[in-house]
Amino acid sequence: MFSVISSILIIVLIAVLLYHSYKKQKRDSPFPVWFFHGFTSVFRANLTKELKNSYKKNINPFFSKTEQIILGSLFFCFFYLFVSGFYFSLFSTHRMFGLPLMLHMIFGCFFALLLCAVLILYANKFNFLEQETEEKHKLLWNVKRALFWMFILSGLSLVATSFLMMIPIFIYQTQQVFFEIHRYSALVSILTAPGFLYTSLLKNEKKQK
Amino acid sequence: MKNNLIPIILLFIFFLLCPDAFTQQEEKTKWDGNRTVPVHNIWLKDEFDQKIIPTESYPLPFSSRYTCEPCHDYSQIQKGLHFNPFSSNQDNRAGEPWIWVDVVTGTVVPLSYRDWHGVFHPEELGLTYWEFTLLFGRHMLGGEISEPKIEERNPKSRWNVSGILEINCLACHNNSRKQSHSKWAFQILRQNFRWAATASSGIGEVGGMASRLPATWDIYDGPNPDDTKYAVVPYVQYDKSQFNRKHEVFLDINHQPNDERCLVCHSVSPVSQKQFLAESDLHTSAGLKCVDCHRNDITHTMIIGYEGESEYVKMPSASDFTCRGCHLRERESKQKKMAVGRLGAPYPTHKNIPPVHIDKLSCTACHSGSLPKDNLTQVKASRANRLGIYGIAQWDLDYPVIQEPVFKRDPNGKLTPNRIIWPSFWGYLQENKVHLLKPLKVQEAAQQLLKPDLEATKILSALSAIPNLEGSPVLISTGRIYELNPDGGLDASDYSGETPETKTYWAVKKNNSITPLIPEFDPDTEPLDREIEYRIQDTLEALEAIENHPGKAALVYGKNMHQMSQGYLEKKERTDGKQDLPKLCWLQQDKIIELISGFNLNAIIETVGYPERFTEKQVKKILQSLFEFEDTETDKDFFFISNGRMFRLNHQGELEALKHPSAEPVLWPLAHQVRPVQQSLGINGCSDCHSLNSTFFFAEIQGTGPIKTSHRAQRSAHYFMGLNGIYQKIFGVSFYARSVLKVILFVSAFIMVSIVFIMVAKLLGFITGLLEKRR
C-alpha cells in the first residue's frame, strides 16, 4: 500500500513541478517536445559547468559559507536516506537490512543534527509572524513557509520515531506503528523538500529580476 | 438428436459403474462427533485375513493391515509421511535423513529416498528395499518400501522368509505400557519382520529367528520339528489372558498417540546432558501433546508445522499450527485473514526486538534447540544414534556426530536453526563422478587395518586366562591404561602411577592398583623364584594359545631369554643386547619382534579413548589396500571423505586432503526443544548476536569425522547464513556506538520540539492578539 501511495505521489509531484516549470517558461513548443528537449539537454550539457553556474547564480549570493556547508550536508544526508529508504520500500520485498541499514542509521543521526541546525538558523525567518513585504510574492512566500514547516515537522517525526524504535520498552506492534509513521513522514519530507527547493529557486529568480 | 444423447448415456453408465469416482475419499467409519475413543475389543487377523485363535498350535502373528482394515482404510494410511519415504518430496525442505553408520569403517552416510541436498539415494550405494529395511527397520514403522509388492522384490532379498513389514499401527496408537520398541528392534535384527508388530505389542511372545532359516523357507512350510535349537522357525505364544472367550483381544487404542510413542524415534538430547537435568519441551510442560500441533487425518499426512507448509500440502489449516499461526494468529492462506490462535496461545510482545528480526528470522532461531556457543553442541538423535533400544547389548552409538545449532536460510529466506553432520565414507572417483563403497567391501579390502586394537585385545583376552592373576590384564603405554571392555574392544584410562622406563608394558589391574604382569627379578638367579617361574610359564603358554600367533612367545630380561620348550620353561643366554626390564615378545626365526606391532600400537595410542577411529597413516594404508584389492580397475581413484575433506593418495603415494563437494556437510532444520522467552536468544539484548565475537555469527564450526587429523573444514557460523563476516563484525561493533546515536537523536528531537513549541506558542499569541505581527 505504502509503495503504491508513495509511487503515485512522487510521480504527481514530479509532473506538477515539470508542468509548472513548462508554463513558467512560456514556450511555444508542446509539453512533450519541451520535456524531451530538456531531458536530452541534460546529456548534451557540460554538467559540471551547469552546476557551477547554478551554484554561482542561486546559492552563493544568498547563503553564507556556514549555511552552504550545513545545507549541502543536509542535502547529501537526505539524498542517501531517501535512496536507501525508498529503494527497499518500492523495489524490494525485504525491509532495509545490512550495510544500507547501518549507513541509514548513521546518516539519520547526521540528518537530525543538521535539521536541528537548519531550524535554529531559519526558524525565525520562516515564522508565521514574519510577513512578506512585497505583496506580489505573498502567495509564494506562504507556500514556501508552509513547505519549510512541513519538512521540519516530518523531519522531527522521523527523528522521534527512530529514537523511540531504539528504546527497549515498546512491543512489536507499537514498533510497527512507529515504523509506519516513520516511512509516511519520510514520504511527506520527500514531497516537501523538492517543493521547497523549487519555490526557493523561483523566489531567487524573482529577486534577481 | 440421437448422436447428442450418446455421451450423456455413456456418462450415466460411468456414474452407475463407478459411484465413488467423484466422491471424496473418506474414512470408513465416520466420526459421529463424540470425542471418546471406541473400546477396541476386536479379532486379530493374520496375513491371510483369518481370525487368530490363540489356543491353536503355531498361530500366526497378527497382521495390522487385516486387523485394522475393516474399520480403517489401510490404503489411505499408506500415503502417510511416516510410511512413505517418497512423500513430501515437493517442498524441497530437508528433514533428518537416515544415516548409515558403520563404526568399523568409519562410514557415516546420510541417505534418503527424498531428493534432499547432500544426501545420497540408497540406490547409489546399491541398497535394496530389503537391505534398507534391515538397516533402518529398527526405527521404521513399516509400509511402502518395507512391504513391497511381489514384482518389486529383489531376488537377493529374503522377504519370503522374513515376511513384509506392514505398517505397525500399534507403534503409535497403542496406549499400553507393554508396547516395546526394543522388542520391535530385536525382531527386525532377527529378520522376523512379520512377527515384529506382535512381539512389540505385548500381546504375544515371539521366539525363533528368521535370519537363521534357509532362503527357501516360506510361511507355508511351517515349523521345523528337526531343529529346536538353532534354525528355529519364528513362532508366537499369545498371552491368552488378554483374549476373551470369543477370541477377541482388548487393544488399548489411543486416537492421539502419547508423546512417548513419538519420542521413540524423535528424541534428541545433548550428549553432555545428565538425564535428571534434562528439560522437556516448553509446550510439553504446558500440557500439550506432540499431536496437538503435528496433526493428521486418515491419510496420515502429518502437519510438520513450518512456515509455508500450507502452500505445499494444499491444506490451509496447516498454517494454524505453525508458531506464527498459534502465537501471532496469522494465517498464511490469503483467502481469509482472521484470528485463529489456538488454545489462547500467549501473544509475544517482542519488546526491544526491531521488526526486521521477525522478517529475517524464523521463530525457532531464537526459541528452539541449543543456544549458540563458541563450539556447536553435540546431540544424539534416536534414529541416527540408535537410541531407545534397551537390552543386554549397548545399542546406542557415538556416531554420527550431530551438532546444533547452525543457522541457515530456509526456502522462505529466513534464518533457521539446523542440525549438521559431516559425512564420512570410502569411495572412488571415476570420470569425476563420486562412487560410494559399501562398508563390507572396505572391510574385505582393508581387513586388519581397520582394527588395530585387535592384536591387543587378543593378547589381553589370552592373558586373562592366566591362573591366579587376581586382576585383569592391562596394557600400559604413554601414560594410559588399555583394558578389555565387555564388548571385546579396548577402553582407555589415564595411568597416574610411576612411569615405566619402557614405552609399553603389560600389567595387572586390581582394585585400581597396577602391578607388572611379570614382576622384576634377578634374571641371573638360578633357579628362579617359584612364583616368578610359574607366572612366566603361564604367561608364555597363554600367549601361545592365541590363534595364528606370529611366533614363539618369549620373555627377554637382562641377558637372558625365557621361552617354553616341550612344556618346560627354558632359559637361554642372549648375545644381541641387554634388556633392563622384563619384556614379552615374539620370536620369529630367532628374531625378536614386539607383541604388538608399532603401527597398531601407534593407532591404539592415537585413537582408543578418543572419538576418532583412524590415524592418517591408517587411512593411507587402507587406501593402498583398496588399490591393491581392485588391481584390475586402475582408473579408480580411491578416497576417504571425512572432516569435510577428501583424503586421497597423490602421485607420490602420499596422503593429501582436498576440498570436495561430496565432503560438504548435510543440514536439516530443527524445531525442538522449544525454550521460553527468558531463555531465548536475544533476551540479554542486541549483543547476544550483534557483537564483535558473537557466537551467533562467529561460532567455530569444524568438520568432524573418524580421522585424527589437522586437516579439517573450518567455517564460521555466518558462512552458512550466506552473510559477510567482516560486515557482521563492523555491524556488531556499531552497537557500542548505538547509545551515542540515541543521545544524538534525543538531543536533536528535544531541540526541534522546543523550537516548534515556541513557534506554536507564538502563533497562538498572534491568533489571540496577545502578540503583534511584525513588519
Image: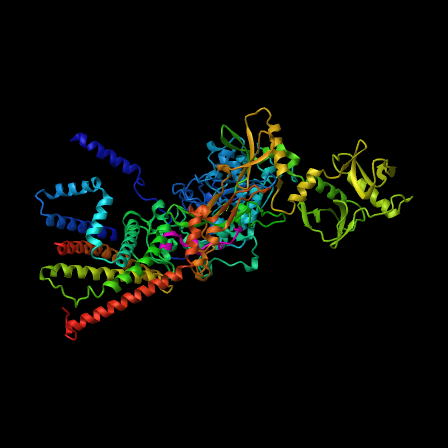
Where B148 sits versus B495, above or below? Answer: above
Please state which of residues B403 and A208 is positioned toward the viewer in this rendering: A208
Please state which of residues B56 and A98 is positioned toward the viewer in this rendering: A98
* A113 lies left or right of A124: right
Q: Residue furthest left?
A: A28
Q: Residue furthest top?
A: B632
Q: Residue at x 35, y 53 (%)?
A: A103
Residue B80 place in picture, x, y as percent:
42, 44
* B683 lies left or right of B187: left
Residue B32 place in picture, x, y as percent:
35, 54
Q: Residue at x 53, y 39 (%)?
A: B645
* B595 lies left or right of B21: right
Please state which of residues B453 and B718 is positioned toward the viewer in this rendering: B718
Is residue B252 visible from the viewing direction of this image? Answer: no
Classify the position of the C terminus of chain A by image quarter. Answer: bottom left
Res B571 quadrant in image: top right
Report if residue B430 lies within the magenta region. Answer: no
Is residue B608 visible from the viewing direction of this image? Answer: yes
Residue B163 place in picture, x, y as percent:
52, 38
Q: Residue furthest right?
A: B526
User: What color scheme is it?
Assistant: rainbow
Q: Total number of numbered labels?
A: 0
* A81 lies left or right of B545: left
First to last magenta residue range:
B356-378
Residue A90 place in picture, x, y as percent:
27, 49
Report if residue B358 lies within the magenta region. Answer: yes
Q: Residue at x 72, y 41 (%)?
A: B458
Res B544 quadrant in image: top right
